[in-house]
Structure formats: structure tokens, C-alpha cells
Image (spheres, grey):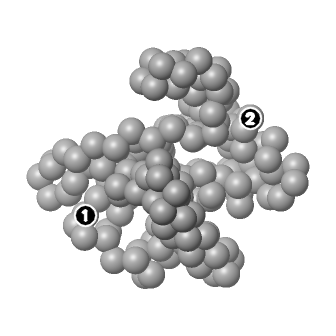
């Protein structure tokens, strides 16, 4: 089982996704049917804006620029579950991309990408990029065929 703690740090998120907590909970429940998570796992996701994500990127990655998603993996055992880390996603980044596609689709791409980082995937090497990209698309396609 996997659970997300959602922090809405920027009010415009709720104009696009009325109840982000419920939205993610349903998506993760669907995903659980396809992928069996090793243990009870939990992560936090902050739905924020460009300003805040730029500050986080500067503080933790020493990169003074805006980005779409940041992931901060960790493995903390808490009683009966493992806390696997934090994700931050920028509203403006997703909203701009959604002009071409769809806001929820773009949001799904970003939280899936962040979750895969928390689960140990990366894209530093070409072969790792291909593996992660394939996994992202597999999950994204699965979730979007259920809508």
C-alpha cells in the first residue's frame, strides 16, 4: 500500500484539481492494483508555485532556476510503514504545459516521475533514462486507460 500526504501551498491548484488529496488517493489505489508495493509506504507531495520551487532547487540542488518537479528520497521506518520522501511540483510549469495537452495528464506525469525517483529510479545514465521513461509511460498509460 502507498499513501500520499498532500500539502497545497499555492491556491490555484484547487482551481484545476478541486480535491488533490482525493485525486491522488484514487490514482494510487488504482496503481496499487497494478504494482504491488513492497511494504506500506508513504510520501509527501507539495503542490506549489515557481517561486517556491526555485527556492527549493537553489537550497537543495544549488541550481538557481525554476523546475517542474523536485524529489527528495529518504528511507525512514516509522512503526508499520516506510516514509520514502517528498515531492514538490510547480503549478505554473504544469499549467503552461497543459496548454498543449491536459492539466491532470501533465500533473500525473510529474507526480509519477517524482514517485519513481523516491522508489530509486534515476535518469543520469542513458540506460537508466530509458528504463525510467519506460516505467513512467507504462504507469501513465495504465492510469489514463482507467478514466
Dot 2 crowding, Cα within 10 Å, few <14, some 14–19, many 20+: some
**Percent coordinates x, y for residue 113 in the rendering:** 53, 55
Point 60% across, 70% down: residue: 137
* Mark 1 crowdedness (10 Å alpha carbons): few <14, some 14-19, many ≥20: few
Q: Which residue is pictured at 65% across the width and 27% down the height?
A: 66
Relative to residue 55, is residue 93 drawn left or right? Answer: right
Mark 1 or 2, nearer chain start: 1
Image quadrant occupied by the N terminus: bottom left
In-front residue for pair 8/100? 100
Local SS, label 1: loop
On the image, the x and y values in percent for residue 127 come to 48, 62
Residue 119's image quarter?
bottom left
The residue identified by callout 1 is 40
Q: Is residue 126 left or right of residue 85?
A: right
Count of number-bearing discs: 2
Residue occupied by mark 2? 92
Amino acid at each position: 500500500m502507498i499513501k500520499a500526504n498532500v500539502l497545497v501551498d499555492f491556491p490555484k491548484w484547487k482551481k484545476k484539481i478541486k480535491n488533490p488529496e482525493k485525486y491522488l488517493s484514487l490514482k494510487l489505489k488504482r496503481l496499487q492494483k497494478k504494482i504491488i508495493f513492497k511494504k506500506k509506504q508513504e510520501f509527501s507531495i507539495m503542490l506549489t508555485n515557481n517561486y517556491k520551487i526555485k527556492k527549493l532547487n537553489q537550497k537543495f540542488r544549488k541550481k538557481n532556476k525554476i523546475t517542474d518537479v523536485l524529489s527528495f528520497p529518504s528511507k525512514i521506518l516509522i512503526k508499520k510503514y516506510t516514509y520514502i520522501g517528498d515531492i514538490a511540483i510547480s503549478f505554473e510549469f504544469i499549467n503552461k504545459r497543459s496548454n498543449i495537452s491536459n492539466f491532470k495528464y501533465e500533473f500525473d506525469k510529474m507526480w509519477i516521475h517524482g514517485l519513481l525517483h523516491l522508489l530509486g529510479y534515476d535518469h543520469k545514465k542513458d540506460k537508466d533514462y530509458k528504463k525510467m521513461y519506460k516505467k513512467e509511460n507504462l504507469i501513465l498509460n495504465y492510469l489514463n486507460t482507467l478514466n
